[in-house]
Image: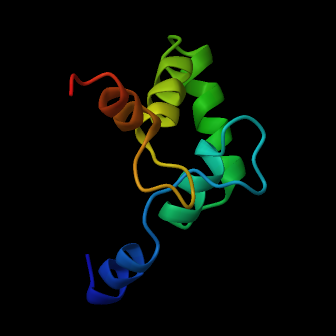
Amino acid sequence: MTTAESSTREDHPLRRVDRGHIVAGVATGLGEYLDIDTAVVRLAIVAFTLLGGAGIPLYAAAWLFIPAQGASESLAAELLHRHQPA
């Protein structure tokens, strides 16, 4: 990875986005992070779903573990913090 690539990734962290999304913003966020078209990410998810069924669990995991745009932590982290004893 070049210095330019690493600085771009640091400036643009992996996030689920609020605009241009269909379900939860996972494909749009991954597309922006990887600097590829969102349609390619969506096609990959569909392909994984049709060729073995892994697309749906992978999408659900990404939805839980990738923080939303503007959020400090993911949904999974919020749920874990909420259910920890005081």
- Asked which quadrant contains residue 86, the reply is top left
Residue at left offset 45%, top offset 58%: 14
State the image coordinates of residue 85 (x, y, percent, origin top left).
21, 22
Name the residue rendered at 55%, 61% in the picture. 70
The residue at the far bottom in this view is 4
Point out the residue furthest to the left here: 86
The percent position of residue 43, horizontal first and vertical second, equals 67, 37
Q: Check the image and report above or below for 86 versus 52.
A: below
User: Taking 86 as reference, is 32 left or right?
Assistant: right
Q: Which percent across, then down, holds residue 73? A: 40, 49
The one of 65 and 33 positioned closer to us in this rendering:
65
Residue at image point 27% right, 88% down: 3
Q: Is residue 45 above or below residue 8?
A: above
Quarter where residue 26 is shown: top right
Residue furthest toward the front?
86
Q: How many marks?
A: 0
Quadrant where the N terminus sits is bottom left
